[in-house]
Each structure stands twice: as structure tokens, then as C-alpha cells.
Image (cartoon, rainbow, N blue to C red):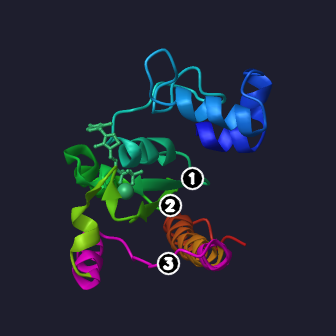
Amino acid sequence: MGANTYLEGTYTEVYPEITEDESGIHKLFRQFSFPGGIPFHVAPETPGSLHEGGELGCALSHAFGAVFDNPNLIAATVVGDGEAETGPLATGWHGNKFLKPARDGAVMPILHLNGYKIANPTILSIIPAEELKSLLVGYGYEPFFVEGDDPSLMHPAMAETVEVCIGRIHSIWQAARVDEHCKAGLGILT
Ligand SMILES: Cc1ncc(C[n+]2csc(CCOP(=O)(O)OP(=O)(O)O)c2C)c(N)n1
Ligand SMILES: [Mg+2]
């Protein structure tokens, strides 16, 4: 978040001493996760942050909490492959069992399989792709794989896949909501 807010200019607006040049970048990097500097996680001093971050594991449970009784919300939730190894996150996949597509929004988890947790390999990145796919299907998801490391190819590939997933979610909503409406004897929704 620090890097993002620096790149789009907000960081320098809030902290003018972190200038948008080489010396500013140098100061930003030197203060990162350093005594007297700034924390390595999202913290109150991070521009735009709502709360203290740092504890891995809550991404999916927070996302499901946001969409219950919020029928038009899709929570696109990035899960680190290291975070995915925590107990709370491993359990968090099951939030989908409590979702009612007729009345709740949807969670679209995006597993960021970069292979590492800081500097060590992650379990989900070393198991065969088929095994990972089966695991996610078993949790009740339809997985899509977007693979590569060239930003000019990854950006459109990711955008295209997210479009497909949003389309799938809308079809599930539509089917469940029409069904619910009919059961209530209210006729077909237009
Ligand atoms: C509950 C908990 N355990 C351990 C940590 C320490 N920790 C911070 S980042 C990290 C690795 C996260 O890996 P990943 O989600 O893959 O992110 P990446 O390193 O790929 O950016 C760990 C273990 C933590 N913040 N919270
Ligand atoms: Mg990782």
C-alpha cells in the first residue's frame, strides 16, 4: 500500500519529505520496516488505510462478512499463498457455505500464487496444479488460472478472466433471484 500510494502521489502529499524523485524513493525504502521508520504492514499512518493490518489469515472471513446481506457487492479478495497457509484462511474458504445467492453478494478470491511467503516456498505453489485445482473445487469454487510474469500480457489476461468471473457470478445471482421471486408468487422479474 505504501508503494501504491507513493506511485499515485498521495504519499508525497501527506509526507512532503518523501519526494517524487530518487532521494524520496531512497528515504521511502530506508524507512520501510526499520526502527523509527514505518511498519512493513498497512498501519494508521499509511494514507487511506482504515485500520491496522499485519495479521495474516482474515482476508476471506472479512470478505464474506462484507457481502452478507449486501446483494450487489462482489468482494474481489487477494489472498497471498503464504497467507493461505494460516489456519484462519484455510478455514475461510468455507464462508461460501453460508452465502445465499438470492440475498447476499459474492466473494471472488484471487489466490496470488507467487511461490513464496517472504523468502520461503509455499505449499500451494509446490503441489501439482491438478491437485490445487481439485482442492479449490472441493472447497466449492470454480478455479481459473492466469499464469505468467510479463505485465503487458498479464494485465489484459487478468482483466479478461475477471470479466468472465463477474459474468458467472451475475448468472448465479440471476438464476437464484428469479427462482426466489417465482417461489414468492411474484411472477418473473424483468
Ligand atoms: C498470523 C501471521 N503469521 C505470520 C506473519 C508474518 N508474516 C508476514 S508476511 C508473511 C508471508 C506472507 O506470504 P504471502 O501471503 O505469500 O505474501 P508475499 O510474501 O508473497 O508477499 C508472514 C509469514 C503474520 N504477519 N501474521
Ligand atoms: Mg506469496
Q: Which residue occupies the foreground of this view, 42 or 133?
A: 42
**Dot 1 crowding, Cα within 10 Å, few <14, some 14–19, many 20+:** some
Residue 146: mark? 3
C-alpha distance separating marks 3 and 1:
27 Å
Q: In the picture provided, is 8 more to the left or to the right than 172? A: right
Task: Specify the quadrant of the image occupied by residue 153.
Answer: bottom right
Tag 2: residue type? Ala
Look at the numbered disc 1 and give the secondary structure of its residue: loop
Q: Most prominent secondary structure in the magenta stretch?
A: helix
Tag 1: residue type? Pro
Seen at 28% across and 49% down, the residue is 89
C-alpha distance separating marks 3 and 2:
29 Å
Give the number of the mark in front: 3 or 2. 3
What is the quadrant of the C terminus in the image? bottom right
Q: Residue furthest bottom?
A: 130
Number of residue marks: 3
Q: Which residue is mark 1?
A: 71
Give how far across and how far down residue 65 sits, in percent: 43, 41
Tag 3: residue type? Val
* Residues in magenta, as a range: 129-158
Q: Which residue is mark 2?
A: 102
Give how far across and how far down residue 32 sits, in percent: 51, 31
C-alpha distance separating marks 2 and 1:
7 Å
Look at the numbered disc 3 and give the secondary structure of its residue: loop
Seen at 35% across and 41% down, the residue is 58
What is the quadrant of the N terminus in the image? top right
**Dot 3 crowding, Cα within 10 Å, few <14, some 14–19, many 20+:** some
Give the number of the mark in front: 3 or 1. 3
Counting residues from the start of the chain, the first of labels 3 and 1 encountered is 1
